[in-house]
Image (spheres, grey):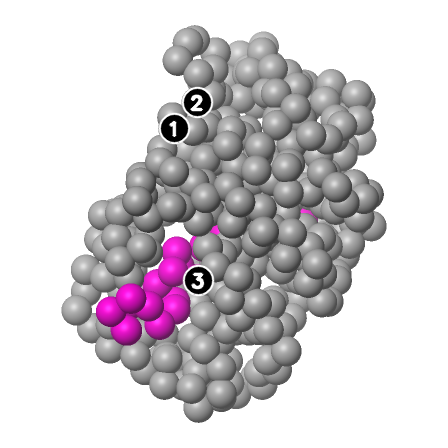
C-alpha cells in the first residue's frame, strides 16, 4: 500500500479510501438486511491490506434506505474498535435526516452539535479525523455552520473539515472563513471517474491553490466501470435497485459498446476494467499534480483485493490518451446542480 500526504497537511492516508455507502446485503431481504458480519470482515481485510482511510456518513445505512440511518457508522465502529485508533483516519459527513422531527437535518449549530455526539457513539471513538458538510444547507447561514465546527474543533472532536458537492465559488469562500479561525478546510468529496470528469477544471484548481485533497466518490461510476454489465451479472448491482443509475449511465445505447471497448483495452493490459479505471485516476492525479484518493467500496472480498491490486498497474501518458479517447464518447445523462450557501443577514 502506498501512502500520501492528503492535501497541504501533515495527514498521511492510504492511496485508496474504503467507503461504506454500499455494503453487502443478504439476498433474501435485499432492500434492508445489511450483512453486518460480511461488512465487518471486508472492512477488517481492508485495514489488514494497508488501507488506513475510511469514509462514512451519519445517514449511511449500507443501502439507500433512511430507516437504517446510522448503521454504516455503527458497522465501521464495530469493525475498527480493536485496532489502534491512531493508525486510522476516519472521515464522516453530516447534513442528512436522522430523525422524524424538526432540526434533525441540515447544518444548523443544534444539529451539528447533536450529531457529533451521536456519531462518535456509533463509531466508538473520541474523535473523527475529517468532518464534512455532506451537502449545502441553504436554510442555515454558513457563519452558523462554521461556528459550530469551531466548537467541535476546539473540543478535539474533529481535526479537519471538508465539503461534499459544493459550488466551487462557495468552497473558496468557506475555506477563507476556516482559515480566519485557524482551522483547515482540507477535504473535497466530489464525484469523479473516467466518464465523469467535470471537476478537472475549477475544482482541480481549488485543490492546488487552497491545499485541499480530493476524496473521489463513485470512482467506478457506481459499478458501471466494471465488467458486470457486460457479463449479465448485474442482478445485485446498484443499478438493479436504483433506476436513476440506469437513466444516468445506460440510457444511451452506445454506452455498452464503449464499456466493451474499455474492457478489451483492460484485457490487453492483463487487468480488469475496474482496475484500469482506478489506475487511470491515480495516474491522472499524478499528471495534474493534485491529491486525489478514490473512495472504493466492496461487497465481496475479491472486489476489495482487485481494487487494491490496481495500485500495481503503471500506466503511461500514452495509455491515458488512449483510454480517454475511448471513454470520451460515453454519454452521462446527468447535469451538475449545486445548492448554494447563504450568508447571515448580519
Q: Quadrant of the C terminus?
A: top right
Please rate how many residues cluster around mark 2, counting C-alpha atoms within 10 Å: few if below 14, some from 14 to 19, many from 20.
some
Residue at image location 61% in from the left, 54% down from the top: 17
Q: Are marks 1 and 2 in contact (CB under 8 Å)?
A: yes
Location of residue 234 with respect to 255 vertically, above or below = above
Q: Is residue 206 visible?
A: no
Q: Which residues are magenta?
A: 212-233
Label 1 secondary element: helix
The residue beneath circle 3 is 220
- Is residue 202 on the magenta stretch? no
Above or below for 200 versus 24: below
Q: Going by the image, does 21 lie left or right of 67? A: right
Place of residue 80 in the rendered image (x, y in percent of width and height, measured from the top left) = 69, 42
Helix, strand or loop at label 2? It is loop
Q: Give the residue number, with chain letter if any, for mark 2.
A: 97
Residue 31 location in percent, x, y? 31, 39
Give x and y (percent) for residue 11.
78, 49
Q: Give the alpha-carbon distance from disc 2 to disc 3, as whole Å.
A: 27 Å
**Residue in front for this viewpoint, 150 or 52:** 52
Q: Residue at x 26, y 47 (%)?
A: 241
**Disc on the earlier residue, 2 or 3:** 2
Amino acid at each position: 500500500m502506498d501512502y500520501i500526504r492528503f492535501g497541504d497537511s501533515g495527514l498521511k492516508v492510504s492511496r485508496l479510501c474504503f467507503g461504506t455507502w454500499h455494503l453487502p446485503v443478504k439476498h433474501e431481504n435485499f432492500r434492508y438486511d445489511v450483512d453486518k458480519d460480511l461488512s465487518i470482515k471486508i472492512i477488517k481485510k481492508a485495514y489488514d491490506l494497508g488501507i488506513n482511510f475510511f469514509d462514512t456518513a451519519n445517514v449511511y445505512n449500507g443501502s439507500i434506505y433512511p430507516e437504517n440511518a446510522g448503521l454504516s457508522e455503527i458497522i465501521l465502529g464495530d469493525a475498527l474498535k480493536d485496532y489502534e485508533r491512531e493508525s486510522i483516519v476516519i472521515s464522516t459527513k453530516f447534513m442528512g435526516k436522522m430523525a422524524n422531527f424538526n432540526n434533525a437535518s441540515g447544518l444548523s449549530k443544534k444539529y451539528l452539535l447533536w450529531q457529533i455526539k451521536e456519531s462518535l457513539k456509533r463509531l466508538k471513538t473520541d474523535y473523527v479525523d475529517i468532518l464534512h458538510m455532506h451537502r449545502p444547507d441553504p436554510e442555515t447561514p454558513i457563519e452558523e455552520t462554521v461556528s459550530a465546527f469551531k466548537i467541535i474543533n476546539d473540543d478535539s472532536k474533529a481535526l479537519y473539515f471538508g465539503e461534499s458537492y459544493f459550488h466551487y465559488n462557495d468552497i473558496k469562500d468557506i475555506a477563507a472563513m476556516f482559515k480566519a479561525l485557524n482551522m483547515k478546510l482540507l477535504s473535497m468529496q466530489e464525484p469523479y471517474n473516467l466518464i465523469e470528469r467535470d471537476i478537472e477544471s475549477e475544482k482541480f484548481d481549488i485543490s492546488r491553490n487552497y491545499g485541499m485533497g480530493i476524496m473521489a466518490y463513485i470512482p467506478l461510476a457506481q459499478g458501471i466501470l466494471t465488467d458486470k454489465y457486460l457479463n449479465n451479472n448485474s442482478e445485485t448491482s446498484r443499478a438493479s435497485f436504483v433506476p436513476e443509475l440506469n437513466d444516468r449511465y445506460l440510457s444511451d445505447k452506445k454506452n455498452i459498446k464503449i464499456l466493451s471497448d474499455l474492457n478489451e483495452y483492460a484485457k490487453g493490459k492483463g487487468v480488469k476494467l475496474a482496475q484500469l479505471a482506478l489506475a487511470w485516476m491515480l495516474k491522472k492525479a499524478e499528471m495534474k499534480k493534485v491529491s486525489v484518493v478514490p473512495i472504493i467500496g466492496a461487497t465481496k472480498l475479491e472486489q476489495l483485493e482487485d481494487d487494491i491490486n490496481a495500485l500495481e498497474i503503471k500506466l503511461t501518458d500514452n495509455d491515458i490518451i488512449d483510454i480517454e479517447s475511448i471513454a470520451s464518447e460515453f454519454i452521462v445523462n446527468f447535469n451538475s446542480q449545486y445548492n448554494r450557501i447563504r450568508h447571515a443577514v448580519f
